[in-house]
Image (cartoon, grey):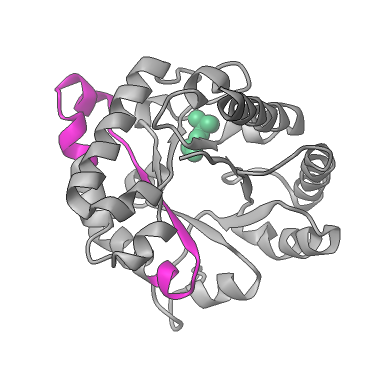
Amino acid sequence: MNKLFIAGNWKMNLLLKESQELILRIDHGIRPLNLENIEVITAPSMVNLVPVSMQIVTLKSDIKLSAQNMHFEEKGAFTGEASPAQLKSIATKYVILGHSERRYIFGESDEFINKKVHAALKEDMRPILCIGETLEERESGKTYDILQRQIRRGLDGVSQQDLGEIVIAYEPVWAIGTGVSATPEMAAETHDMIRKYIYESFGENSMNIPLLYGGSMNEKNAEDLLRQHNINGGLIGGSSLKAGSFLNIIKTARTILDEKKTS
Ligand code: PGA
């Protein structure tokens, strides 16, 4: 896949003014860049989605908007939640689903996440399905079992046609927010396994599913990670909160793609 996805997950950070400043800086930084085959995505906190979406439209920016979560029901008595249609109506293109913080802090199961995947697809939004093992699971040799289960259940019932809309983010739980990223070799090995597994499970159309790496990706380690064959981008938390580091990762993606073109 000759495309790289650079997605910033802002989590529960940044006030409105800070979010808008960051969007302005990112937009300013990407304007002179050739973004061919690079998808720049930002996922502000839910409360800032509407103004940020309006800002992106006003700026005519290439930044794509993502939500960090949503409910699967269309509407109703679900205090504190946002529906797929509501997100769609404010020009949300992507939605992060099954992030480990949702799984472990808010108790979301694979089945619950699977309903959200279907609900997002129904509204023509692209789900970014997050999967990842804990340190304990890795150390006890269960990594592949866990990831395969999360993929199998998370994508259960997704049609062949919709496979092209799916994005998978591999985020080892022990690497998230810890400053300890997976080594490029370790990430590559896991991504190769994921690619093989989805190919065996879903066939040729699964080749269109981008596999992002997430977990302490930053401007220093991004190059080695993004150069790996089956790493098609990054889901970046901490390092997406500063325009400079996020933009440097985008520039790294440009360099890698340009080199591939000429080699
Ligand atoms: P991090 O977060 O880059 O801060 O480790 C990544 C994520 O949780 O999506």
**In the image, what residue occupies the spot 49% across and 71% down?**
124
Q: Which residues are magenta?
A: 119-147
Which quadrant of the figure has residue 247?
Answer: top right
Q: How many callouts does the rendering have?
A: 0
Residue 44 placement, left or right of 148: right
**In the image, what residue occupies the spot 65% across and 71% down?**
90
**In the image, what residue occupies the spot 15% across and 37% down?**
145
Q: Can residue 178 be seen in this snapshot?
A: no
Is 254 in front, or is 212? 254
Residue 41 image point, x, y percent: 62, 48
Residue 129 against residue 211 in the figure, above or below:
below
Residue 152 image point, x, y percent: 20, 52
Is 42 in front, or is 47? 42
Quadrant into which the N terminus falls? top left
Residue 174 against residue 183 in the figure, above or below:
below
Residue 103 against residue 231 in the figure, above or below:
below
